[in-house]
Image: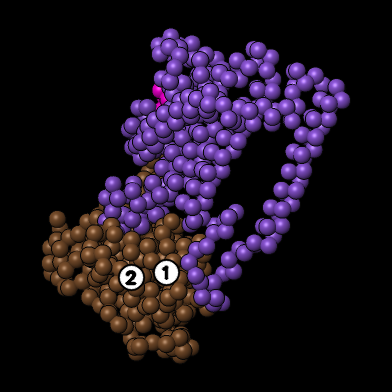
Chain colours: A brown, B purple
């Protein structure tokens, strides 16, 4: 594999996506390139955001990284070694809360640990208890998903992913469907949680402000085929609070990314 | 029946849970009054027309005659022997069909190969009016428990099989994907996602199959048998004992209602997780 050589030369601790290509067979028999040679680096403890217009394949990219769908070219490396399929070191927070309707909040947070048959049941239950506090769902442990608001469902979704103690958290527009206030609250809570244990996060969003607010580095994707158009380092100080969104340094970065995406769209219209 | 789920601290965060006990109770009262009222009216009209002589009680009996016959039957051990014969035929046939329909339904819903192999066969069998098989069944098994149980089974099997298959097949793709992201294998997907999701379908299938099974056992006994409630009906009809016919029909109506009601309660208990309609 030629990728292995490339990977070896840029070896580092963490997750690396190298030249990942995803091709779909289209209905008419031809092929559609959804992702074209995507390269993303997520070193240990880094918060990476991926932004792009809808249809750029950013969710597809995340699902490839999660090992849920195969890719046609390139490789996925963890600490320099190729990985395929889902693994315990990665956990996904889905766009749709994807909660099991017949499990309570407690049961849903437990689910990933159930599937992986670890840790021991008493440890698992204790972990659920502390996660319920962490995501602010105390008092709702025995509630079923249909009794929760959208924001609460996403908290369960997040807690379930954290419960398996992954090294890497893959987040697929988790706050996209929430109202503005709830979204901002969830962003800030996510940052607080991240500050505590500094997991590697790959966060997909179409919201530029969200990407800049959360991430250390933002990958800007173009649409059809999805390509990495630019990589923007966000050197804003941490810990960040929502006020930072009004600062000039912040809005300047945001505007820069917005112009990048805007330019793409105009190209597309023409 | 009130569903109580957990105890929520009343915070503004919770979307107001659909709380309608007042309206629900009112609606229930309303239904009871109207529905019950109509039944009472019907019984009164029946009694009256029989007393006045508009209808001939020898053919169509009357509520008081049915009730007095019923009271006499309920203390007659022979009647209970017939009840037992019917109950056994139903229980054996229904039990076997439930177990086999669940096993087969889950397997056919989950494994495409099995579904493709067996679906044409079952579709063909389903298309046959099952009562057309009765003479053949009698020829093979003679009349008795086996014949009855098989007839019940043939009728009760399909609604549960079909509901179970579609329940398993409708497994939510986003939940399957979520489970796979945690590394779930095929067996775990089946047991933690597909089967729990199929429970509401299975319960609907159970209710339909119980109702059809009851039809099966009675029709089997009407057609050919020497015991059971169906036999009682046909025997009483042939000897012009219409009071007796109606009394047995009343017993069957009560049994059918009870069966349906208990399965509905089971449903309410098992699917606490569904929003109330």
Which class describes the residues within 10 Å of circle 1: few (<14), some (14-19), or many (20+)?
Answer: many
Q: Mark 2 points at which residue?
A: A128
Q: Mark 1 points at which residue?
A: A141
Relative to residue A246, is residue B15 depicted above or below?
A: above
- Does B120 appear in magenta? yes
- Does A202 appear in magenta? no
Q: Dividing the image into 4 quarters, which one contains the N terminus of chain A?
A: bottom left
Relative to residue B103, is residue B268 depicted above or below?
A: below
Res A211 label: none
Q: Mark 1 lies on which chain?
A: A
Residue B51 appearing in the image:
yes
* Location of residue A40 by image quarter: bottom left
Viewer-closest of A6 and A245: A245
Read off the magenta span: B119-123
Left/right placement of residue B118 relative to residue B86 reads left
Per the image, label 2 sits on a secondary structure element best described as: helix
Of callouts 2 and 1, the N-terminal one: 2
* Residue A130 image position (x, y, % from top left): 33, 76
* Residue A261 image position (x, y, % from top left): 44, 71
**Mark 2 and 1 residues: CB-CB less than 8 Å, in contact?**
yes
**Distance (Cα) linking label 2 and label 1:** 9 Å
* Location of residue B111 by image quarter: top left
Which class describes the residues within 10 Å of circle 2: few (<14), some (14-19), or many (20+)?
Answer: many
Left/right placement of residue A167 relative to residue B149 reads left
Please name the residue shown 32% across and 33% down the image: B113
């Amino acid at each position: 594999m030629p990728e292995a050589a490339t990977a070896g030369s840029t070896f580092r601790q963490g997750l690396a996506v190298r030249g990942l290509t995803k091709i779909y067979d289209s209905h008419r028999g031809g092929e559609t390139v959804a992702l074209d040679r995507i390269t993303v680096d997520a070193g240990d403890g880094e918060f990476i955001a991926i932004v792009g217009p809808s249809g750029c394949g950013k969710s597809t990219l995340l699902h490839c990284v999660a090992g849920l769908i195969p890719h046609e070219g390139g490789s996925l490396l963890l600490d320099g070694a190729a990985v395929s399929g889902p693994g315990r070191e990665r956990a996904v927070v889905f766009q749709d809360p994807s909660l099991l309707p017949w499990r309570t909040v407690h049961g849903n947070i437990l689910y990933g640990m159930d599937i992986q048959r670890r840790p021991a049941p008493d440890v698992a239950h204790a972990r659920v208890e502390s996660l319920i506090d962490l995501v602010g769902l105390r008092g709702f442990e025995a509630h079923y998903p249909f009794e929760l608001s959208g924001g609460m469902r996403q908290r369960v979704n997040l807690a379930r992913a954290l419960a398996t103690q992954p090294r890497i958290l893959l987040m697929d527009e988790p706050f996209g469907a929430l109202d503005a206030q709830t979204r901002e609250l969830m962003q800030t809570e996510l940052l607080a949680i991240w500050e505590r244990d500094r997991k590697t996060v790959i966060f997909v969003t179409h919201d530029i402000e969200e990407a800049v607010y959360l991430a250390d580095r933002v990958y800007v994707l173009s649409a059809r085929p999805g390509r990495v158009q630019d990589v923007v380092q966000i050197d804003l100080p941490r810990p960040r609070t929502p006020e930072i969104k009004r600062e000039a340094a912040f809005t300047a970065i945001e505007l820069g990314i917005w112009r990048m995406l805007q330019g793409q769209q105009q190209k597309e219209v023409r | 029946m009130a569903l109580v789920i957990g105890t929520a601290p009343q915070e503004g965060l919770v979307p107001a849970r659909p709380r309608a006990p007042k309206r629900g109770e009112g609606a229930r009262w309303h239904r009871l009054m109207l529905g019950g009222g109509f039944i009472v009216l019907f019984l009164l009209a029946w009694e009256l027309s029989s007393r006045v002589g508009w209808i001939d009680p020898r053919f169509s009996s009357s509520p008081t005659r049915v009730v007095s016959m019923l009271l006499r039957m309920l203390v007659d051990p022979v009647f209970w022997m017939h009840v037992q014969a019917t109950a056994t035929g139903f229980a054996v046939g229904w039990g076997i069909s439930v177990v086999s329909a669940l096993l087969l339904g889950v397997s056919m819903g989950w494994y495409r190969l099995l579904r493709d192999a067996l679906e044409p066969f079952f579709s063909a069998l389903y298309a046959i009016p099952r009562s057309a098989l009765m003479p053949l069944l009698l020829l093979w098994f003679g009349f008795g428990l086996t014949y009855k149980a098989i007839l019940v089974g043939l009728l009760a099997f399909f609604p549960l099989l079909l509901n179970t298959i579609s329940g398993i097949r409708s497994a939510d793709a986003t939940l399957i994907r979520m489970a796979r992201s945690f590394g779930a294998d095929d067996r775990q997907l089946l047991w933690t996602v597909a089967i729990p999701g199929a429970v509401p379908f299975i319960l609907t299938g159970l209710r339909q199959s119980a109702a059809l099974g009851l039809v099966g056992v009675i029709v089997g006994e009407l057609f050919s048998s020497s015991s059971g409630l169906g036999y009682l009906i046909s025997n009483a009809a042939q000897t012009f004992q219409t009071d007796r016919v109606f009394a047995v029909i009343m017993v069957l109506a009560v049994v059918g209602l009870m069966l349906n009601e208990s399965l509905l309660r089971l449903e309410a208990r098992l699917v606490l997780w569904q929003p109330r309609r």
